[in-house]
Image: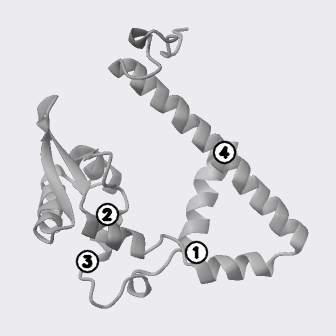
């Protein structure tokens, strides 16, 4: 099994076994479905996400996604707006209420995570946490590289047009 295959196989197994079950996740007065909560977890209140990206992530059609988003919008959990650069694109942002619901239900169950960690020998736990830390740092570096690349395309900070170095990848 390749390293990529190992990660693709292992991470979902871990998260599925440690995830917070929907019926345990939210206060009883919150009226969202598990599917809607999954949608809310893919959004934030600063950086808009495109409707097409959400549909692709969840493996549904654009019309199905639009229907789900309309329900969330009516509930006051999201806002939708046309992208000023491309009026064909619909962007979605969380409202403060949507963010509160999303944040009230962490994806992993702290009690289950604690139980797993406590079931390990101290040296196993240290190795596992060190490995997770290294993986998290690598993903942060990759995200930072991606953000610099996107800023370069848009002519933002760090781009060639702002007087800084070119950040676009070299062609091979």
Q: Please give the residue where the numbered disc 1 appears in the rendered image.
A: 17
Q: Answer with left or right where residue 168 lies relative to residue 9.
A: left
Circle on res. 137? 4
Instruction: Classify mark 1: helix, strand or loop.
Output: helix
Assess whether mark 2 and mark 3 are in contact (beta carbons under 8 angstroms). yes
**Front tag of 3 and 1:** 3
Q: Please give the residue where the numbered disc 2 appears in the rendered image.
A: 40
Task: Give the mark nearer the N terminus: 3 vs 1.
Answer: 1
Residue in the picture at 16% in, 28% down: 85
Residue 66, percent across and down?
Answer: 14, 56
Residue 172, by quadrant, is top right
Residue 64, by quadrant, is bottom left
Circle on res. 32? 3
Assess whether mark 2 and mark 1 are in contact (beta carbons under 8 angstroms). no
Mark 3 → mark 1, Cα distance in angstroms: 22 Å
Q: Answer with left or right where residue 79 lies relative to residue 162.
A: left
Mark 3 → mark 2, Cα distance in angstroms: 10 Å
Instruction: Classify mark 3: helix, strand or loop.
Output: loop
Q: How is the image coloured?
A: one colour
Task: Give the mark nearer the N terminus: 1 vs 2.
Answer: 1
Mark 1 → mark 4, Cα distance in angstroms: 23 Å
Q: Residue furthest bottom?
A: 28
**Front tag of 1 and 4:** 4
Q: Answer with left or right where residue 28 lies relative to residue 139.
A: left
**Is residue 2 visible in the rendered structure shown here?**
no
């Amino acid at each position: 099994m390749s390293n990529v295959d190992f990660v693709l196989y292992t991470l979902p197994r871990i998260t599925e076994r440690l995830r917070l079950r929907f019926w345990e996740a939210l206060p009883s007065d919150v009226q969202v479905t598990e599917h809607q909560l999954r949608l809310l977890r893919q959004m934030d209140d600063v950086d808009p996400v495109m409707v097409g990206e959400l549909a692709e992530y969840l493996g549904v059609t654009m019309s199905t996604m639009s229907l789900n988003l309309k329900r969330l919008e009516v509930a006051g959990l999201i806002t939708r707006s046309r992208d000023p650069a491309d009026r064909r694109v619909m962007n979605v942002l969380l409202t403060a209420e949507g963010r509160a619901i999303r944040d009230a239900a962490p994806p992993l169950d702290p009690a289950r995570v604690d139980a797993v960690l406590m079931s390990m020998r101290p040296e196993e736990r240290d190795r596992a946490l060190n490995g997770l830390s290294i993986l998290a740092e690598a993903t942060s570096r990759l995200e930072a590289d991606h953000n610099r690349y996107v800023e370069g395309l848009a002519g933002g900070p760090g781009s060639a047009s702002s007087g800084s170095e070119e950040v676009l990848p070299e062609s091979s």
